[in-house]
Amino acid sequence: MQVAVMLAAPWREPAEAVQAFAEEPWTLAFLSGGGGARARWSYLAREPDVVLRLDPDDPRDVFAELKAMLGEAAGTLAEGPPFQGGVAGLATYELGDRVERLGLARASGWPDLAAARYPAILAFDHQARRVLAIGRGAGPEDADARARTALTWLDTPSSAGWRGRLSATLAADDGAAYETAVAQIVERISAGEFFQANIARAWRGRLAAGAAPGDLLERLVRESAAPFCAYLRLPGAAVVSNSPERFVRVAADGAVETRPIKGTRPRGRHPGEDAALARELAESAKDRAENLMIVDLMRNDLARVCAPGSVAVPDLWTVESFANVHHLVSTVTGRLAPGAAAVDLLAAAFPPGSITGAPKVQAMKAIAGLEAARGPYCGAMFWASVDGAFDSSVLIRTVSCMADGSGWRVEARAGAGIVADSDPGAERLETEAKIAAIAHALTGDAG
């Protein structure tokens, strides 16, 4: 069993520390912001000792490979962060095709899974305003050396943020076509095919010459911090996510939580309007019904790997406010059954119910017929700690970046959960409210 060493250092803003390595392949970060208990810890990981990329034609069992990478469970460091080193990475939406064989098309250049094992990480405690370096190795000297190497990452200077516009334009898919797609989904719901489906539209552009994905990360963290911001730089590609949504979490003791989002209103132009919009969302029968469908779906997903009788809904229909929208959020909890691990929960629940629909498989079939392959969008970024803890985000408010001979192409999507009484025009406006912060980060001048 590996030994772990944890060392403390003075505070440094995590986004600054990440920026120094943002264009290095396999740099990975989780940057919590926006305040509250879910914004306590941020992480920086780099220099993995093992990497795993599973492309669509790779026949290996994704979940078995993840378990093998993690290896034998290790003990929890007292006073340490939830993530204490281990495996972290990206599960694209189409990984769901390995859970339920639907013949999903794949987005060019994106694997089903990209993950790495990190023997050293930095954990940033926003509450205590300190940084913890954790190193793991075969013995105390090896672990201590890795922790001390991680501390040196804090001394690397960051480049200044990109000045000016990151992208000259961001072109949206046709709004009228999206409304037509929504109307078709409403008809199919009325015909009894499914109850809800999450349909998205895309915005595409290019980064300015000389700009890079890390510049977009810095801009989003500064302008619209979110609790589940995440970043992964791959060779020739990057994911920049500013997600407000947790997918599934497992504590080291086996406690499970998921927090699906369904229901949205834009932020108001002044405090009175803002409060009225939040109140409207809280009282909306349509949004409550939409949220409840996904709560029931997630209860079913958790029950596949949780102890009988342990799945519960302690919080239903809580309004949470973010930089550009209010969301309706519920909480579902459980406890892993004996013999079950966090990777089993990932397999049982993927892809997230909040961005597919109910029933999930029928909704995924509808999505595949109306959208191009999603790639990172609506997949998950995750970490799996060596002590059994696990956390993951739903990749909404996410930009997929792909390098070509001329720089970086970017794509972002925003969707809406369509139900029987959805209005196509209102659903289109909801997608525009959701994309607003990303659109401003890409096409607005630096603040």
Image (cartoon, rainbow, N blue to C red):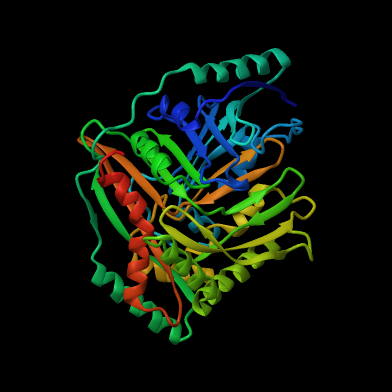
**Between residues 126 and 277, which one lies in front from this camera angle?**
277
Residue 39: quarter of image: top right
| Rendered residue at 66%/55% (across/down) | 257
Residue lying at 64% horizontally and 61% vertically, measured from the top left: 331
**Residue 300: image location, x then y, percent:** 65, 67
| Left or right: where 418 falls relative to 100 | left
Viewer-side residue, 6 vs 61: 6
Report the number of numbered marks. 0
Q: Answer yes or no: is residue 224 visible.
A: yes
Q: Nearer the viewer, residue 63 or 224?
A: 224
Above or below, 250 relative to 266: above
Q: Is residue 142 left or right of residue 187?
A: right
Residue drawn at (31%, 75%), measured in percent from left and top?
A: 425
Give me the residue at 37% from left, 71% from top. 427
Location of the C terminus by quadrant is top left
Query: Is residue 111 in view?
Result: no
Where is residue 244? Give x, y as percent.
50, 52
Q: Quadrant of the N terminus?
A: top right
Q: Quadrant of residue 405?
A: top left
The answer to which quarter of the image holds residue 423 is bottom left
> Residue 58's spot in the image, x, y percent?
47, 45
Residue at far bottom of view = 191
> Looking at the image, which is closer to me, 23 or 16?
16
Q: Position of residue 59 (x, y in %)?
A: 50, 47
